[in-house]
Image: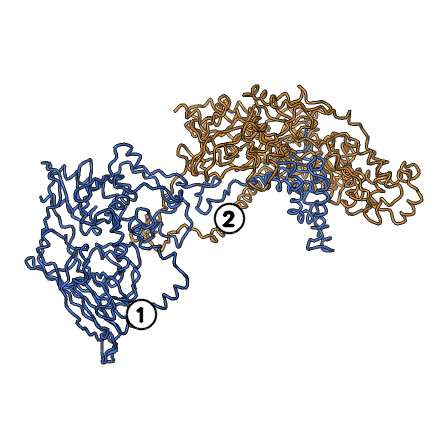
Chain colours: A orange, B blue
Amino acid sequence: MEEAPEAPVSDPVPALIPTPTPCPASNIPSRSLLEWRKRVKSEYMRLRQLKRFKNAEEVKALFMSNRQKIEERTNLLNEEWSKLRIQSVPLSTPGGALPGKKLCMVEFGFPAFKAQAVAMRPLTTVAGIPFMYSWSPLQQNFMVEDETFLHNIPYMGDEVLEQDEAFLEELIDNYDGVHGDREGGFINDEVFKELVEALSQYSDQEEEEEEEAAEEKGGKEEEEKGVRKSAGEGTEEAKVGPTAFFRRKRRSVIEVRDLAAKKKIPHDKIFTAIASMFPYKGTTEELKEKYKDLLEPPSPVKLPPLCTPNIDGPFAKSVQREQSLHSFHTLFCRRCFKYDCFLHPFHATPNVYKRKSKEIRMETEPCGPDCFLLQKGAKEFADQEMLRSQRPRRRRRQPRPPSSSCPGPSGTTEEAKEVDSDHETTSSSESNSRCQTPTKLCPGEEHGEQVGPPVQWSGAEESLFRVLHGTYYNNFCSIARLISTKTCKQVYEFAVKEVLIHRVPLEDGGSAPQKKKRKHRLWAKIQLKKDNSSNQVYNYQPCDHPDQPCDSSCPCVMTQNFCEKFCQCEHECQNRFPGCRCKTQCNTKQCPCYLAVRECDPDLCMTCGAADHWDSKVVSCKNCSIQRGLKKHLLLAPSNVAGWGTFIKESVQKNELISEYCGELISQDEADRRGRIYDKYMSSFLFNLNNDFVVDATRKGNKIRFANHSVNPNCYAKVVMVNGDHRIGIFAKRAILQGEELFFDYRYSQDDALKYVGIEREVDMA
Amino acid sequence: MHHLQHSGEVMSGTSCKANGAVYPASTTVMTTVKKPKMEQIQADHELFLQAFEKPTQIYRFLRTRNLIAPIFLHRTLTFMTHRNTRTNAKRKTFKVDDMLLRVEKMKGEQESHSLSSHLQLTFTGFFHKDEKPSQNSENEQSSVSLEVLLVKVCHKKRKDVSCPVKQVPTGKKQVPLNPDCSNQTKPGSLPSLLVSSNEFEPSNSHMVKSYSLLFRVLRTGRRDMNGLVNGEANENIDVTEVPSRKKRSSAHREDGETTETFVAQMTVFDKNRRLQLLDGEYEVSMQGMEDCPVSKKRATWETILDGKRLPPFETFSQGPTLQFTLRWTGDASDKSTAPVAKPLATRNSDGSSPVESRPSTLKSAPLSVKASVSTDIQMKREQILCEPRQKLRIFYQFLYNNNTRQQTEARDDLHCPWCTLNCRKLYSLLKHLKQSHSRFIFNYVPHPKGARIDVSINECYDGSYVGNPQDIHSQPGFAFSRNGPVKRTAVTHVLVCRPKRTKPSLSEFLESEDGELEQQRTYVSGHNRLYFHSDSCMPLRPQEMDVDSEDERDPEWLREKTATQLDEFTDVNEGEKEVMKLWNLHVMKHGFIADNQMNQASMQFVEKCGAYIARRNLCRNFLLHLVSMHDFNLVSVATIDRAMSRLRHIQEELPDAGADDQADRALMEGACNGTAIACSSGGGGGTKHGKRTKSSVTD
């Protein structure tokens, strides 16, 4: 779907109008240029045609695969149903026709054909249901980026648009453009490459006629290779469009020296012709450079700079700990426990500084008869290192070792060599260290034990050691057990080498944390927040300001949020919410969490039950329903009021959670833009969350989205801070019986929501 | 007059035709206000008939449906408890062993009595309600002559064309015609016949195949053709009687003098010499002799009335019947110790199956058994009833536009006019009418001779559906097409265990002054609607009601989304991607919310995905994941150790260990890396032209 829409064929035509070629030597090959331009045009058309055909094929294939999926699913369902004892839908048998059945006659004008009649089988009427736009089910909010491009111009029936033409113009003005506008008539990289390759065949022929046949032959072969490769890449490259930025950035890093040398670049004439056809794509030289870039083939060893090779793969390299863990560290969302979560766009990297120190303990018992601890001096080494590594290490954002973070001009092949040389250097340093090592290893003993062939460490093993060393320090037995391919003795020996080469720069992590006594001003603080921020609720973002306490400059303090467990500040931070120590249900203002409109944090509130019984639906704490998803079974049926409605299956008590109102989390700006369209549709699922975000259940949501508005509702909405996220809970305003339709007052906060709720306005007017 | 009569015909064609069958003892009365403009009256009357016709037809249909496929049993309703003939008194003393004893005892008795006993028939009366029991009926003949013949059907002999039949007359009796049920207390005064059991012994000449009793009733009497009756009517109403339907039994009519013959036959012993007639009260439907075509049709158990199919017992409210008590006595005067037949069916039990299947005899007649026991109980109960056991008259007054249009009288008949349900009590009748026929409004007005019920159309009848919502949406007309029991949507619920009920009182049916509208409205809470799947808008079927299929934490699209989203990264290698995807799916499935769940979650992850991780050769990536989790302070070192050792364990237990595994792994590695490249160049648009990079996530 991201496929670049095809350019209208007519688009390149204006370019055909001879533009004054910038080339000063244009007078010389005027004939051949014209010839070339003709070729360019015909080839371009051919390629476009080909591409269109391919697209159509792809769509067809996709359609077929979808059909198949549906069929499979249907079969599965049918099978399931046949097992259940259910009332089957009776099929009217065509044979057992009633005598009074109508016949459907087809008569022909020609007497030669007999009139054909077939019994009419009218379908029974099925009761109609309200209108519904399709939507995707969701049980948690889903953050989406602003759409600066309008994806489609909404259709609301001809009447609406006729009435209000200005609306559409205004709407489009709100966006940077409409999707697909810009891409028309544009020759993308893929087409460009193919075009050049197709044209180069002409040039081959020409040049063969003229001169230097031998040299060109080699080039031609190369070209053909290129063609094959590009065919594989084909469609995917079309997607590149919007991410051109990354690509450019990447390309400046990766040079193609070796390839440039090998590859024969087609004749300049081709580029000149293309440049004259598509003047906005750049000059001849630029096009040539671009083509060179595009020629660079994908290679198995060549990976993007931040990408470390698969540690389980055959190309695993020996890299630093940070590098091995880089993907895991950067993509992991500490709040959702997921990689690249749907809710939090920015993930903080781990705070190594805060490691629980109690876990670092030294193994004192040898793990076996061959344990390294039995070696002379090993224990001392381990202990000594232990002390050192126990010192607080500087946390995160360590500059990557130059070898890995910026490979610079050196290609991967070179990097591989580098690793080799790394080995050499280690071995050489090892030999050096034998006499100089501070660990006072007796060289004689070492030699005595290393009689056998020197142990080979693969890149993966080396990387793994570094990773584990950062966690286990000198517990070499444990490390060896985890690596599993090396004994602890080998690990120990490797560690000794490593110490000399990659000595972790020791930094003192600033002054020791001052332990201020926490003043119990919590209540006052909550109250203060409540008073101040009647309408001003800001989104929480974990604060991260190293070496600085959470004072007035801290974002949490500024937005009047508490610091959460996700903040990088100290545990003793003044602004942290301490959780409750309730022993009851946390459903009164006696509970500080409840008072602060927060759900109990299972990592802070250890007494109320919020941290117990994970599998059970019965929790003593009544203030953790949203996070646990303790929603009620809702049902969908045509509403008694308007459109669809949400009904409850079982009766609920007052103040029980009914459901979370889920949807897409969008910015206020985006909500403004979308709201304009929704207002026109007279139906809106927008729900103000806080000053920064709005929940929009239009495209994604859950069944509560169908609950209608009422001024005398049976439910109420409440925005609750749940483990750092604002979430909307829909609660029972009174006891609700089973089968009741659910309503809530859309204006949960008089000022904000009203603006976005179209239906509400409609109701008010009526 | 002519006009009126004509419209009366129309009326009986509509509302009364529907309940005519129900209404043997009813007086059909048409009333009109005297007005000169006959056309207007007639038009008005048409409207009245139309208004009442539709609901009547509906209730008529529902009645039949309830007979065939009952939704509930009337006897379970609190106001119908007297219809329940069982008592639980014996339950306390019940022992399982008694069952055997009882059966054995019964068997012995049956054998013994079959030899030495008389068949005693005591005739209660001959009932023929074809015409109204008019007041001047006393002047007429009050008895009919009954002849009972024992028919012996013998085995065919070689020469015989058909089975030889012997008829042995056993006696003639005068049997009261239409006796009053209330004075039937003196059994001695009733005519009775004795048939010696010797008659049932095999005779000499022929081997008797079966024995049956043939009842022949001869009736002679005058008849008032017009049957004009001055019924109870308001002073301002003209009373006209219209013959409600044609006589069905054949009658020789000679100047009002008629002689009719009715016959019925019952098998005593069938051809297997099984006794068919046990002790009990019987009511036999009689057939007019000349009514040949009908009787042919009656050879089956179907009953056809006016071209409509009726349940078998319909005939009992229709045609002439003969009631008698049958006893097998050892001694002519002795009280019977013979087994008592079970009450298989009472006169009004709807929809019960035929008592027995009978071999086709000459003329078979439907038959029902009224057990004497049940009648006894009934009698006892009825004595308790508050209502005096007297001739209770009920006047149904049909109102339209606040004018009385028609008055119908029922004498001592507490059947519901719409569904023929015998309510037996006025209170029950009224309650039933209110509850089951809410398209009408019924108001009870006390009347010196009984009760008056004002019937009018319920204008506020709420057509809202209170039944199974599933039935609305399923194809119309297929309400009975289900085979066997199916799960239904629970619409009704038992809410109270022992509710406090107000004492039944007729006053609750009196017309109330206020809040009448509220009363008429049936308010039902609960799931009285059809629900739909939120994803497909397909109706939710009852068996899908209990599972919330659309509320999963990880819907399919989200699972796919997280995978594609990770695939888009160009600078994350395929091993990392795979572990991340696995972990994400794991977290999404279980919805972890707390840091302190992570140790447990990691172990769960190993248990669930360990085999896959080992097979896909992702162990080191998994270790990296664990270490990363540790760096985030989410898992302890101990968890890493435990998880990894568990993984190694799983790895060792993999079935294809050994050399095969090695090759497999090598292949996998190659494939893994190969596909990763292909995939990243395929999915993300080339290794270098990626969609997203992780650096863009952090910055």
Q: Residue furthest left?
A: B255
Instruction: Determine whether the residue tagged by mark 2 lies in a helix, strand or loop.
Output: helix
Classify B544 as above or below A623: below
User: Which residue is the site of mark 2?
Assistant: A71
Chain on which label 1 sits: B
Classify B576 as above or below A391: below
Location of residue A407 in the rendering, given as x and y in whole percent from the top left corner: 77, 33
User: Which residue is the site of mark 1?
Assistant: B110
Instruction: Determine whether the residue tagged by mark 1 lies in a helix, strand or loop.
Output: helix
Marks 2 and 1 on same chain: no
**Amino acid residing under circle 1:** Gln
On the rendered image, what quadrant is the N terminus of chain B found in?
Answer: top left
* Tally of numbered discs: 2
Whether the residues at callouts 2 and 1 have beta carbons within 8 Å, the answer is no
Classify A480 as above or below A680: below
Depth check: give the residue in front, B543 or B382: B382
Q: Quadrant of residue A420?
A: top right
Q: Residue at x 78, y 30 (%)?
A: A392
**Amino acid residing under circle 2:** Glu
